[in-house]
Amino acid sequence: MKTLREAKIGDMVRVVKLHGEGAVKRRIMDMGLTKGVEVHIRKVAPLGDPIEITVRGYELSLRKADAEMIEVE
């Protein structure tokens, strides 16, 4: 299982599954990160937090904890 946090800068990945429960999972889905969507890894901050991605045509910054909940391929 590979998570969004493990993806490298420049990678294009597809969301396979969202882990987590309740409000956290709902918030991730509300940001456009749903099963099957393609995500481009744009930047990673020097200490690894946050991660900047492009999803559905807009830029989004995610915390490492949130990125670990997103399984990708």
Image (cartoon, rainbow, N blue to C red):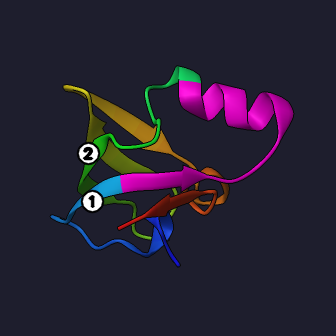
Q: Residue at x 28, y 47 (%)?
A: 39
Extent of the magenta region: 15-29
Residue 54 in percent (x, y) is at: 25, 39
In contact (CB < 8 Å): disc 1 and disc 2? yes
Residue 38, numbered label: 2
The reply to whether the magenta stretch includes residue 17 is: yes
Tag 2, which secondary structure? strand
Q: Is residue 42 left or right of residue 3?
A: left
Which is nearer the N-term, disc 1 or disc 2?
1
Q: Which residue is mark 1?
A: 13
Q: Write down the quadrant of residue 72 in the picture.
A: bottom left
Q: Is residue 31 magenta?
A: no
Q: Compare residues 43 and 11 and report the one nearer the observer.
A: 11
Q: Is residue 4 above or below residue 7?
A: above
Crowdedness near tag 1: few (<14), some (14–19) or many (≥20) residues, C-alpha within 10 Å: some
Q: Which mark is residue 62?
A: none
Residue at image coords 81%, 28%: 23
Total marks shown come to 2
Question: Which quarter of the figure has residue 22?
Answer: top right
- The 10 Å Cα crowd at callout 2, few under 14, some 14 to 19, many 20 or more, is some
Can residue 26 be seen in the rendering of this structure? Answer: yes
* Mark 1–mark 2 distance (CA, rounded to whole Å): 6 Å
Task: Classify 18 as above or below 10.
Answer: above
**Amino acid type at image mark 1:** Val
Residue 11 percent location from the top left of the image:
19, 66
**Residue at x 58%, y 60% (from the top left corner):** 64
Residue type at numbered disc 2: Glu
As drawn, 17 above or below 2: above
Q: Residue furthest right?
A: 22
Badge 1 marks a residue whose secondary structure is strand
The answer to whether residue 48 is seen in the rendering is no
